[in-house]
Image (cartoon, rainbow, N blue to C red):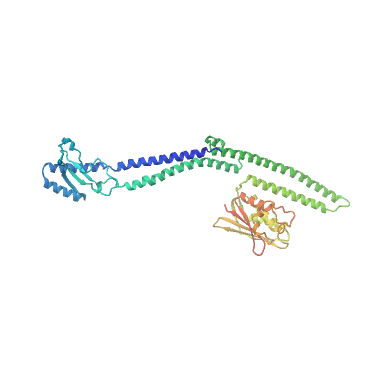
Amino acid sequence: MSRKLFWKLCLLFAAGIVALFYCIHQLAIDTEEGMSLLAEAHRQELLQWGRQAETFYRASEFDQLKTWLQALQIHEQSEAAVVEHKIRLVQGRQLDPDRYTGFNLGRSIDWKIHLYFDRNPVMELPFQGGGASLLIVLPDRMRPGRHWQTTRIFLLIILPMLMLAVLAIRLYCYIMQPLRQLQQATRAFARGDYSVRISPELSRRKDEFSELSKTFDQMAERIGKQLVAQRQLIADLSHELRTPLTRLDIALEFVKKENERALQPCDTTIILRVERESKNIRRLVDDALSLAWLENENPVSRDEQIDLVDLCDVIVEDARFEFTGKQVLCRLPANAPLKNSNHRAVGQALENILRNALRYTAKGGSVELDLSLNKQQAVYILKVKDRGPGVDAALLETIFQPFFRIDKSRSSQNDSFGLGLALARRQLAVVGASVYAENRDGGGLSMTLVLPVS
């Protein structure tokens, strides 16, 4: 397997992190430099103070200068002074006077202010005529970089987190895009669209996802062919099995009529046995084909509005007629409307469950049918309870598997093939309902159907 995606991610990570550190470093330097300079308004104000001090100094109005300096110090809560520049030669030869220019007693207003020092610097405003300067400790209100610590936290912590989040989102989108395509294709395949393919969309990537798409398409093609062949097999089996069964029924009817017209009718036990087995085989074929269709197609049919009470009445009436000597005790409300349902699916499922309960109920026994509404969950709860032998707790879920029978307790009838409960669960799934089993106190089994109101 190629590792193109691996190298792409490595390159993206490496380039992204290097670019991240470089950008943050450069941005921090530029921001710190910009925040270290005095604001233009404060620079003009300092220059104005320098000109005012120079005016008093040039006019030799030292008393007024002193008063003005005191007022300035009180107003700005700072220290200020006018200092003359005097250089005294100690030893050596007197140099050119131009050599003595540029000596600084404080910081120029054009210089940067250190953001990490606690004390404010002394600012120097040299007089235009030279020889003296106004020195003033920079007032707190003029100190640049007041929000530098907050800005620094943003630059060194928050901004990298945001940039890494953007990088993570970019990686997530890059990886999730083919995964979403694969998910959509899988869902379409599950809905029965066996022609779905994803190679054309992902083949341009030339990485592991491209190889995965090819593998998926190969799997989809193979499984699709198998399912189509299985459907065709079921259709052919349905036709091939029903045809000889129909012929067998016709032959039995002919034999029965001939036996009735015979002068010495033969024993009909064998005929009745063959007729019974023929009916069982026909029912087995119908149930098996119905179960196979539900398993393969996963249909959803919720296009009817039915009354669950009326449906129960019809099914119970038929069950009482078929299972004479056994009672069905019903506790039903006046009505139970079901929206977005299907009478055939619900009716066949309930009939299978009720027949199963009556089949394993002793002669003279009874089966209880209780229907109630759970308003909180917006579902109807229908319970079918018998007093049969029950089921081992470990097998309460297994009994819904096709062709599963419990020989010792619930398979005494030879015409039971273990398809009734499996078919009932899948029929209820068609309308969004469910069924589960639980043992009753005192013996017996309770089948609970949960049907959504709408």
- Give x and y (percent) for residue 235: 70, 42
Residue at the image point whose x is 61% and y is 38% from the top: 218
Placement of the N terminus among the 4 image quadrants: top right
- Which residue is nearer to you in this view: 51 or 129? 129
Would residue 218 appear left or right of 273 to someone viewing this image? Answer: left
* Count of all numbered marks drawn on residues in the image: 0
Query: In the rendering, at what x and y percent does residue 328 appear?
Result: 68, 60
- Classify residue 337 as left or right of residue 260: left
Q: Residue sitting at 56 percent across and 36 percent down? A: 199
Position of residue 117 measured from the top left corner of the image (x, y, whole percent): 28, 48
At a point 53% along the width and 38% down the height, the residue shown is 3
Please indicate, yes or no, whether residue 197 appears anywhere in the rendered image: no
Residue lying furthest front in this view? 92
Can residue 75 be seen from the camera position used here?
yes
**Residue placed most toward the observer, 12 or 388:** 12
398 or 283, which is in the foreground? 398
User: Residue 222, position in %: x, y?
Assistant: 64, 39
Q: Where 160 sits versus 448, above or below?
A: above
For this orientation, the residue located farthest to the right is: 263
Q: Quadrant of residue 2?
A: top right
- In the displayed structure, 443 sits above or below 107; it is below
